[in-house]
Image: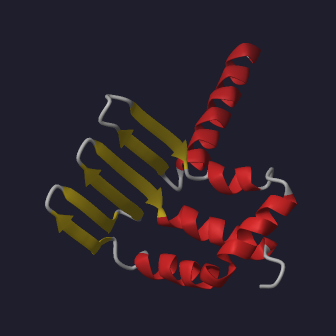
Amino acid sequence: MLLAKLALGLGGTMVLAGAYTFHEGIMRVDEKHADGRRVQVWIPAAVVPVAMHFVPKRHLEDAAEQAGPWLPTLRALTKELEKYPEAELVEVRQSDQHVSIRTHDGKLLIDVSAPGDEVHVACPLAMLEHVSRELQANAPSL
């Protein structure tokens, strides 16, 4: 009976931890190269703001200083884009190249296709807002 209670407690904890980890979605990067190499990275979006707490403060300050002028714009943009779950922001077609930036289900999707190379990025808007807030908090002059 004690073992069953421990298993139930552990299982419940794992379910809650999984739900929290994936509540903001997945950040996905998929790269295909002409030489056949393929790189795929899938990261729970909730991990990125947490990981920023382990970055040395001087590095966060440097990043915040470089991005500083754009942080208020990024925060406003992510808040506004959440109001438009399906929006085509940019689409450029030029002979055999294609770039598309759009929103879909609370994610910013960036797709780039060129001869032999393709890059697809899906980034939850909520994660972008968290990152911009964390950088703004570490900015020396903002």
* 124 or 101, nearer to the observer: 101
Give the image quarter of residue 89: bottom left
Indicate left or right for 23 with 108 as reference: right
Which percent across, then down, holds residue 135? 72, 70
Does 102 sit above or below residue 81? above
Does 80 sit above or below residue 32? below
Does 30 sit above or below residue 142? above
Q: Quadrant of the N terminus?
A: top right
Which percent across, then down, holds residue 107? 41, 62
Total labels: the figure holds 0
Which percent across, then down, holds residue 81? 42, 77
* 45 or 70, nearer to the observer: 70
The residue at 80%/68% (across/down) is 61
Q: Quadrant of the C terminus?
A: bottom right
Indicate left or right for 107 with 131 as reference: left
* 16 or 89, nearer to the observer: 89
Indicate left or right for 33 with 91 as reference: right
The residue at 80%/59% (across/down) is 59
The residue at 70%/30% (across/down) is 9
Which percent across, then down, holds residue 7? 67, 21
* 27 or 142, nearer to the observer: 142
Residue at the extreme left: 95
How does the figure colour the protein chain or chains? secondary structure
